[in-house]
Amino acid sequence: MKRLFLVLIALLCLLAAAPPPEAAADEPAVPTYRVGYISVPGFLTKDADGHYRGSGYEYLEQLAIYAGCRFEYIDLSHTNTSMELLAGNVDLLIGSTIQPGDPRFLFSEHSIGRTPLQLSLTSGVSPETPSSLRIGYISDVYSRDAIDHQLARFLPPGRYALLPYADYQALDQDIENGTLQGIANDSLHPQTGTQPYGNLYLFSHYILYRPDETALKDHLDDATNDMLTVTPFLPYLLAKRQEQKGAPLILTPDERAWLAAHSHIRAFASPNQPPYAYFENGEHKGVTQDILSRIEHDLGITFDITETSTNEELFRRLDDGEADVMCDFFFDYNWAHEHHMMLTNPYLTVTYVLVHRRNEDIPSSPVIAAPRSRNFTRQYVERYYPEKDIRYCDTDEDCLRAVSEGQADIAAVKSIITQALIYRNGFFRLEADNTVVYTQGTSIAVSERIDPIFVRILNKEIAHLDPTAIQSAINEETRATTEQTSLVSYLYRHPIESLGILVLIFLALLVGVLLVLRIRRNHLAEISRIAYTEPVTGLNSCRTPSTALRAPALTAASTSPPSACGRWPTTVRHTPEASSQRASSTRSTARRQHSHGSGSQRSPATARASTRSGSSRPASRLKRRRSRSRKALPSSHSATS
């Protein structure tokens, strides 16, 4: 046993001393490249938790997947970025304003983003200022001729002077001491102490490399081509996703003058589509109205919206020239040209879903209900369904009613209005499918009779709209419309709460019934107490309730003490019962006198004769009294007796 133990100890020592086995094949190392950047909110920033944000960061992270590499980010906000790249402290540079053609650098094949070059003015300065404006720019980055050409849209010749600068440090200093009243700079690098006044032209940003990094540039360019083949508009999509607020609203003097001369705009809007767009007591409401209110506030104009009952009426009157603007137009240029309209960029995206009856399978060739005079009907319904299977209706509500009543199998409705239509109109047999069958953009259509400058103004305003505010408007209108549903709709949507309310109502009714019965019992007990108790003495009464209620009141002459049963003497009533009682009392008195004697001795014969004559007289008198009583009593008393 001891020998075995020693052998095990020796084996363990050998295993511990043996070198670790080498890996069969080392995995290739992933290259890491250092990226220099300037911290710009929305493009590339690092938060307090060490996480990176921005469209530029997301662009490079996607590029790293296709290039098979990693990126390490180095903040160069307080340094000369180009010198850091040339010194070899970083491998590539993003967010720079240096443009292709500079021999000191290599540039990526594709730009990673485009931003506008802006004219920014210091506080308290405007183009209407009488003195000439001194505007600075970086001469190594921006073209003087290009800036001069674009400034003509905002400032007349002779009203400004362009001053070139070699670096931002000197430019910043002159802005602070008031030497400059404006600056031409890209929107990615806003200048402190200035406000944007106008966009001059688009400015592209590239990835910069050192001249000796040709292999790295070619490798990342190939990866970029693969990435953009899959997602061609990736830079735009990433920049759009990063927008927490809309772009600044920058209008030219001509645009401001046009708005001042056209403060009221005649308009139409879609009816009968809550919460998307609808009318209530002649007032336009819904999501589109909330967005239009923001546009009116920003531009200082008013849309005078006229109510229509159907879309067919709306487009007929629009074609007749009764309005200059359609507030929620289907984003389709062909549809716009048919109605002689010009389109803005979409300000809202709407999806369509199918609505069908619950617990019923949709047939292979369903009949679809579709609204008339809708571009959606032409673009989707008439394209994918044969004419014989289309049932045309005036409104979306009529479409759902046709499905509910079995006249159609399905209907395609905007997802934003589906639940409101179902609950407000009691179409509880219907349900909406979650599959989106069609997507459209909603834009503002402007009549071709109007100056196209209004479309350009509206496009600027749509870009200025806050995306979060638009989503908030959708949520608020959807909630408000749902709260206006009927009681039946509430019971359907909240079955458990409704059951609880019904139980509470039943319990309240039951408690009410029990309370009424208790009060009734107390009243009967009080009536019985009054009936069987003398009110003066408080003694129990021998009367029945009926006689107690019929008992006459005491007269002044009735001063005799109460009888043995606790009853005061009352006036004698000539009723058959009373007469019978008096007759019985008389016979009882005669028998008592006969049995006990009267104090004088009479003979038996005299006593018998007296008894017979005495008993016959009261009997005859009793009969006469009964006869008179029957004649004297009214019919009601006779019936009671």
Image (cartoon, rainbow, N blue to C red):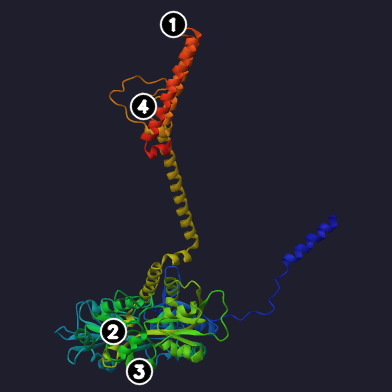
Q: CA distance from mark 1 to mark 4?
A: 32 Å
Q: Which dot, 4 or 3, sits closer to the camera? A: 4
Q: CA distance from mark 1 to mark 2?
A: 128 Å
Query: Measured from the top left, where is residue 87 in percent x and y?
Result: 42, 83
Residue behind mark 4? 572
* 68, 531: nearer the viewer: 531
Amino acid at circle 1: Gly
Residue 390 lies, with reference to residue 472, above or below; the image says: below
Q: Which element carries disc 2, helix, strand or loop?
A: strand
Residue 412 lies, with reference to residue 609, above or below; the image says: below
Residue behind mark 3? 337
Query: Measured from the top left, where is residue 167 in percent x and y?
Result: 30, 84
Mark 1 and 3 residues: CB-CB less than 8 Å, in contact?
Answer: no
Residue behind mark 1? 599
The image quadrant where one finds the C terminus is top left
Amino acid at circle 3: His
Residue 439 lies, with reference to residue 552, above or below; the image says: below
Amino acid at circle 2: Ala
Residue behind mark 2? 267
Can residue 451 be seen by looking at this rendering?
yes
Q: Which element carries disc 4, helix, strand or loop?
A: loop
**Residue occupying image coordinates x 41% and y 38%:** 523
